[in-house]
Amino acid sequence: MSRKMKNKVVENLTIERIATEGKCVGHHDGKVVFVQGVAPGDVVDVRITRGKSSFMEGEAIKFHEYSKDRIDPFCSHFGTCGGCKWQHINYDLQKTYKRQQVVDQFTRIGKVEIPEVLPILGSADTQYYRNKLDFTFSNNRWLTREEIDSGADFERNALGFHIPKMFDKIVDIEHCYLQGNISNDVRNELRDFALNNSLSFYDIRNQVGLLRNLIIRTTSTGESMVIVQFGGDNQEEIEMVMNFLHEKFPQITALLYIINLKKNETFNDLEVVTFAGKDYIEEEMEGLKFRIGPKSFYQTNSDQAYELYKVTREFAGLKGDEIVYDLYTGTGTIANFVAKQAKQVIGIEYVEAAIVDAKLNSKVNGLGNTLFYAGDMKDMLNDEFIAAHAKPDVIITDPPRAGMHDDVVNMLLKLEAQKIVYVSCNPATQARDVALLSEKYSVDKIQPVDMFPQTYHVENVVLLTLKS
Ligand SMILES: C[S@@+](CC[C@H](N)C(=O)[O-])C[C@H]1O[C@@H](n2cnc3c(N)ncnc32)[C@H](O)[C@@H]1O
């Protein structure tokens, strides 16, 4: 960025609309200005932090007028914690913006002919809707401007969330409105216990410290899984922490821990030790049971996951004689959910442990017409695989945010299934993939579903039908 531009203040910028990733936009000198933490209708002074020839980015430093659509954020951590960036916008408007994001992505990126995007399916719960949260221990707590200016000494150990774009700074969380049940109590009690017993909080820069990470997963059936990741292997201290949690929270149904001496927090390649209870929790939907292990993906809003799966099943329009492929199947949730309406369902997924759960889920639910395979989609879905299995009539695909690899898209074009139901948590990559698939498919239905109130994220289901 040129010196001239850096720290330049754009005054009285009217915020016009919401763009991608929750950023809002205004215009100045013929350029788009992206600003975080504001709302359409605000009038603000903006300090420019990044400037390019066609756009600028900045932060609001003074408000002249507040949008009439603003509401008071309910969380004391709002603005510091990166979790719920849209708490200042009322929920009806959040839904409008989310649907608009889908429209925008499909018209701007997708550039394909689309039907009217259906009204978004809102979430009944706009707080405490998550079934999984991941907290980080750190010896480098984020201090607010007021705390620094006060000159006082503050506790620097923290247990909470990463400050956006700062890998080593953690905001200490007192109360999080995203997960109910025992979540807030477990986090706060564990932090207090660690502080009272002088246990070390992880130092990410030097890669040392006992307590590293805490994952809490809950289900609508009342089960809970707590996983503590330790950055050291002092068995006496580990036992102390785990015994504390076991005694304080006997209602935890799966109490697990991991010793992680690696540089990163991922633990797919590490042993998970069951300290007490089971090594999984179980979610339920329409009488079907879904077993979730510590390494398995499960949609984070259970109630809305049910709505999402119902839309997926309806779009698939199964009559009972179809071969269905469920790509990126995770623990086989969608595969098992639609299995009773299909002749056979074949699920493919990267994480081996999730495939173990997917198979178990079929067994537990007495479903004998599913097959599951573990591997990278672009390698798995090849001519050999198709020759060894029946060709699909319907393909359900639910890839990660990055969307599908080109090889996978090309294979779908080659397979020519009658229908593709494309579920995505990122309409931008979904629109990109749909544009490629439009060579042979028409877009028949688009249904946004809100899984994540208070954030800009939107889930989207698209029905593609093979052109005749
Ligand atoms: C959005 S989740 C969908 C899970 C599942 N459909 C559900 O609703 O629970 C995406 C899944 O894709 C898997 N995945 C990511 N990259 C993959 C790849 N290259 N090949 C196969 N699976 C992959 C992830 O492990 C994850 O389980």
Image (cartoon, helix red, strand yellow):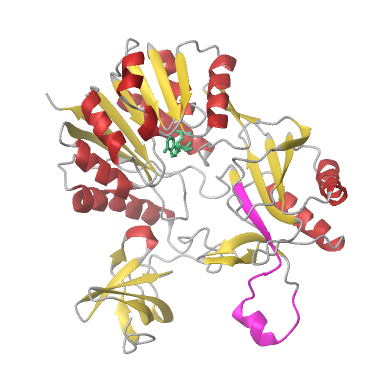
Where is residue 189 shown, x and y percent of the image?
A: 78, 54
Considering depth in this image, is 80 or 74 the residue closer to the camera?
80
Q: Is residue 416 above or below residue 369?
A: below
Name the residue: 69% across, 65% down.
203
Residue 206 in view of the camera = yes
User: Is residue 237 highlighted in magenta?
Assistant: no
Q: Splitting the image into 4 quarters, where does residue 129 fall?
A: top right
At 56% across and 35% down in the image, what residue appears?
A: 296
| Residue 145 is inside the magenta segment | yes
Q: Is residue 73 left or right of residue 399?
A: right
Q: Which residue sits at x=30%, y=53%?
A: 101
- For the N terminus, which image quadrant? bottom left
Question: Which quarter of the image is occupied by the C terminus?
Answer: top left
Residue under the image location 76 percent in, 53 percent down: 232
The quarter of the picture where residue 15 lies is: bottom left
Q: Quadrant of residue 113?
A: top left
Q: Nearer the viewer, residue 375 or 284?
A: 375
Spot occupied by residue 403 in the image (x, y as percentages of width and height): 35, 43
- 208 sits to left or right of 266: right
Residue 40 showing in the rendered view = no
- Magenta residues (range): 133-154
Disc tally is: 0
Q: Position of residue 365 (x, y in %)?
A: 56, 16
| Percent of width and height locating residue 81 | 56, 64
- Asked whether 38 or 262 is in front, the reply is 262
Q: Quadrant of ligand 1?
A: top left
75 sits to left or right of 252 = left
Which residue lies most toward the bottom here? 4
As displayed, is residue 138 above or below residue 357?
below
